[in-house]
Each structure stands twice: as structure tokens, then as C-alpha cells.
Image: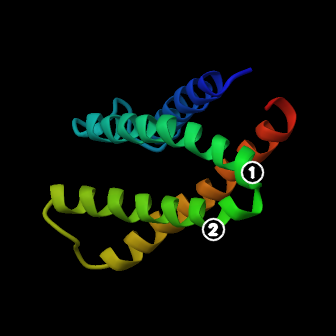
Amino acid sequence: MDYKKFQWLEAVGFFVEANVVMLAGSDFPPPVGFWKVTLAAFVLAVCQWVYTGVLLRQMAAHGFAKTFVPNLLLFVAAGISTALAFALLNGGLHEGGGLWLGMIAFCFAVYGAVFWTVNCLICRRWL
């Protein structure tokens, strides 16, 4: 398989999974503002589509160990950026906003570590 197939599989999988998880945690029917979550998931899926190709090429060229920390830092930065964007679009950080921001950054860091691990396995097995 080539890079593009993995990029599409991972981006579409992320978009579907993110929406299913967020939908499972929301009320039924979803609230009026749920489209914002879907839009954010779409933007993040596009970013992931671009980044997957970059990461796989870096892994193939420089090895796995040299890509872990930059990958983790990128995902933490994406988490903080996404959380701040949501906060600013909804009136700013409120009481407990720092804790909320930290939790979002932590979740993105965990996802970044899982993303890196999956791509290591892909790189070893198919590329």
C-alpha cells in the first residue's frame, strides 16, 4: 500500500470515530451546537490526513525514535489550540478553564502517542 491509502484510512476513521464518541456523549437529539464539534473533527481530520503522510515519510527516512517527541509536542499544541479556539468562540475561558485546557491537551497527547504507535506498526508492516 502507499502513503495516500493510509492517509485516507486514518483521516476518515478519525472523523467517524470522533463523531461517534461525541454523539454517544451528547443528548439525543444532539444539541443545536453539535455542528461545531463535527466541524472541528473535520478540520482535525484534514490536518491528520496531511500529517500522516509527513509522519510516515519521516519514520521511513529517520527511524521511529526521532519522530516520537516531535509528534507528541505537535498533538499537545493541536489540543491546546483546539481548546482555546472553542473557548474563545464561546466567550473565553471560564472558571476551571485551565483544568479543562489541561485535560484536552492530555487527551490529545494520549491520542498522539496512539497515533504514533499505529503508524509505527503500519510503517514496519506495509511500507
* Residue 34 falls left or right of residue 7: left
**Tag 1 residue:** 117
The x, y position of residue 106, in whole percent, is 53, 68
For mark 2, does the 10 Å Cα neighbourhood hold few (<14), some (14 to 19), or many (20 or more) residues? few
> At 16% from the left edge and 55% from the top edge, which residue is drawn?
89
State the separation of the CA atoms marked 2 and 1. 12 Å
Horizontally, residue 8 falls left or right of residue 115, namely left
Say what secondary structure mark 2 lies in: helix
Number of numbered tags placed on the structure image: 2
Quick one: quadrant of the C terminus? Answer: top right
Residue 96 versus residue 17 in the image, above or below: below
Under mark 2, the amino acid is: Val
Badge 1 amino acid: Thr
Q: Is residue 54 visible?
A: yes
Task: Give the residue furthest to the front.
Answer: 61
Q: Secondary structure at mark 1?
A: helix
Q: Which mark is residue 7?
A: none
Residue at 26 percent across and 79 percent down: it is: 95
Q: Which residue was labeled with disc 2?
A: 69
